Image: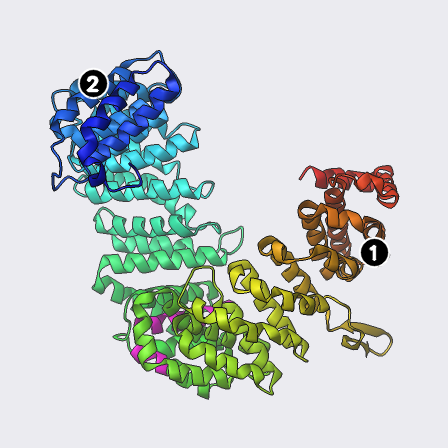
Amino acid sequence: MASHSPSVFHPYIQALSGPILSAIGDRYYKVTAEALRVCGELVRVLRPNFEARSIDFRPYISPIYKAILGRLANQDQDQEVKECAISCMSLVIATFGDGLQSELPSCLPILVDRMGNEITRLTAVKAFAVIANSPLRIDLSCVLDHVVSELTAFLRKANRALRQATLGTLNSLVVTYGGQIGSSSYETIIAELSTLISDIDLHMAALALELCCTIMVDRRSIKNVGLAVRHKVLPQALVLIRSALLQGQALQALQKFFASLVQSANTSFETLLDSLISTAKPSQSGSLSKQALSSIAQCVAVLCLAAGDQKCASTVEMLKGILNDDSSTNSAKQHMALLCLGEIGRRKDLSNHVQIENIVIESFQSPFEEIKSAASYALGNIAVGNLSKYLPFILDQIDNQQKKQYLLLHSLKEVIARQSVDHTGQSELQDSNIVKILALLFNHCESEEEGVRNVVAECLGKIALIEPNKLIPALKERTCSPAANTRATVAIAIKYSIVERPGKIDAIMYSEISTFLMLIKDSDRHVRRAAVLALSTAAHNKPNLIKGLLPELLPLLYDQTVVKQELIRTVDLGPFKHVVDDGLELRKAAFECVDTLLDSCLDQLNPSSFIVPFLLSGLGDHYDVKMPCHLILSKLADKCPSAVLAVLDSLVEPLEKTIVHRPKGDAVKQEIDRNEDMIRSALRAIAALSRISGSDYSMKFKNLMNKITATPSLAEKYNSVRSE
C-alpha cells in the first residue's frame, strides 16, 4: 500500500478492510501490531487527499475507529501494540476527524493519558503532531491546555528524542491552534526554550529557535510574548552566536530568529543591531573565531533586510563611515564592518551607495591580514548583488593592480563560488562575463606566486561546474602547455571541479578525466603532486569516475611513494649543511591518496603488490610520510588481513625503529611532541596487527609485543591507544 498509488486499492477496499480489522483483534501481539500498521496505510488509501473525494470512505470510518479504540483503551498489552495503536489512532483522527466529532471527547483524553506514561509518551507526543498538522483543523479544545502543559514539562526531560519530538509538536500546535493557547502558557514555553539554546546541542537549539520564531510570527500582538523572548531568549541567542561551532540549520534558525524579532515590533532595530555588533567585540578571553564573526555578520545582514530599505541603507552608511574614519585604529571594528557589508551586499544591490567598492578596496592597504581578507570577501559579495556593475570593476582592477592581485582574485572567487552554488544567478554570469573571466584567469595560470595560482585554479574549477562544455576542453588543451605552472594549475582546477553532489559536469568528466590524471607521469614534481591530489579528491567524492582507470594509474601512483635521490639536495648554510627533500610533499600526498583509495576502491587494489616494497619503504621514511603509512597499515590489517600476515615479519623492523626512536638531547618541545605522536601512531598500527588471527605465529612480531609489554612507558602508551 505504501509503494503504490491509492487508486489501485480502491476497488478492493471492502475485501481488504474485513481481514485487516479482524487481525487487529488477534491474540498474538506481533499479528496485532502489524495489522495496526497496515490499518494506518489503509487510512491513507481511503482518503489520499482532502480536496477531491475519489471513494466514499464514510462507511469504513466507524469500524476502523472502533477496532483501534479497543486496542488503544486496553492497558494490559505489549508495548509495540500500544505504540502502534496510538500512531494509528492519530492517523484516523487526522484523516477522518470531520466525521468523528462526537467521538473525539472520549478518544483524545486517552491519548493525553498515554503522554503521562513513560513508555508510551514519545509515541503520544508524535501522535499529537500528526493531528495538529491535519488540514481538517481537528477540535482539540477539550485537551489543548493539558497537552501544552505536558509538552512544556517534557522540555526539561533528559531524554533527547522526547525533547526533539516535543519541540516539533509544539511548533505544529502553535501554527494550528495558536489563538487558543493562553499568554501565560507561551511565557512558560519561552522560558523553557531559552535553556535549550546553546552550542552543546545545535540541532536542539535550531528546533528551539524555530519554535520561538513560530510563536513570534503567530502571536505578534501579545506584548508579554515579545517581552519574554527579549528577556529570556535573546541573551541566550547572543551567547550562541559567539560559538565557533555554530553552522548549518542552527545558524539559519538564528538568522530567522533575529528577522522575526525585529518584525514583531517588540524590540527596536537599533537595539538589536547594537547588541549584535557589540557581541563581536573581543572579550577578555580573546578575540572571536572566524566562524563566530561570520555568523554575526550574516545575522546583521538578515536583520537589516528584515527591517526594510531605509534601515538597511542607514546601516550601510554607518558601516562605510567606520571604514572611512582614518583615525579609527580599532581593527576589530573595521573587520566586522567589512564582513557585514559583504553579507548585506550579497543579499541586496548596494549600487545606490556611492563609491562603496573604492572604500572597500582601500582596506586592501591595511597592515592586518584579517582585514585584507575581509575586504576581499566583502568586495566579492557586493559584486554578487550587482554583477553588471561590480564584476567589470573587479576584472579591471585585477589587470591593473599587480600588488592587489591575490586579494582581487579572492574577490572574483567569491563571485564565482556564489554563482556555482546559487543557480538563480548562473545565467547572468554565463551570458556576459565568462569569456572575460576565463581570458583573465588563463593569463594568470603561469604566475610565479603559488597563492595566486591556487586561487586561479579554484576559480577555474568552480566555473567548470557552471559551464563544463566550455571549460573542460579549454583545460584539456592546457595539459600540453610548455609551462609547468600552467599544467599544475589545470590539475588543481580539476580537483576543485570534482564535488560530491551530482552535476552536469559528470558526463563530460567521465570521458575526459584520464587526460588530467595522466599528468601523474609529468616531468615536474609540482604537476605530479597536483595530479595526485586530483586523483585523491576523485576517489573520495566520485570513485566511479576513476575505477576503470586504476589498473593504469596505480603503478604510476605507487611510483610517487618512492624516495627519489635526484630530488634530495644539500644546502650549504656556512657552518653547517642542511638536507632538503623536495620529494617529501609528493610522497606524503601519494600515500594519503592510497589511504583514500582503500576506503572507496578497495576492490580495485592488490594489497600484496603495494605493501612490499612501497608501504614498507614508507614505514621507514620521514615523520610526515610515516603517519599516513601507519593509518594505511591499520586499514589493511582490518580489511586484507591475509595479505598483511604474509609479510608481517618484514613490517616489524621499521615499526620497532619508530617506537624506540628518541629525539636528540637538544630537541625543542615541538620535535619531542612530534616524536610522541609518531610513536602513538605506530602503536595504533601494531594494535591493529595484533588483532589479525595468526599474528602470534610470527616470532619477530611476538618478540616486538613482548618488548612493548616489558617497557613500562611503551606499555602505558600501547594500552592507552588500544582503549581509544
Residue 633 in the image: state x and y as whole percent: 72, 51
Residue 379 colored in magenta in the image: yes
The secondary element bearing badge 1 is classed as: loop
Residue 635 in the image: state x and y as whole percent: 67, 49
Quarter of the image that includes the C terminus = top right
- 586 versus 94 height, above or below: below
Q: Work out whether residue 531 can be spotted.
A: yes
Q: Viewer-nearest of labels 1 and 2? A: 2
Q: Is residue 505 left or right of residue 591?
A: left
Which of the marked residues, 1 or 2, is nearer the chain's N terminus? 2
Classify mark 1: residues with Cα within 10 Å, few (<14), some (14-19) or many (20+): some
**Where is mark 2, residue-wise?**
66
Residue at left 57%, top 68%? 534
Q: Is residue 650 left or right of residue 472?
A: right
Residue 241 in the image: state x and y as whole percent: 41, 50
Q: Which residues are magenta?
A: 367-392
Quarter of the image that includes the N terminus = top left
Q: Nearer the viewer, residue 38 or 461?
A: 38
Residue at left 69%, top 50%? 636
**Where is mark 1, residue-wise?**
663
Residue 224 in the image: state x and y as whole percent: 22, 37
Name the outermost residue toward the top: 76
Residue 400 colored in magenta in the image: no
- 591 versus 131 height, above or below: below
- The amino acid at mark 2 is Lys
Residue at left 69%, top 53%? 632
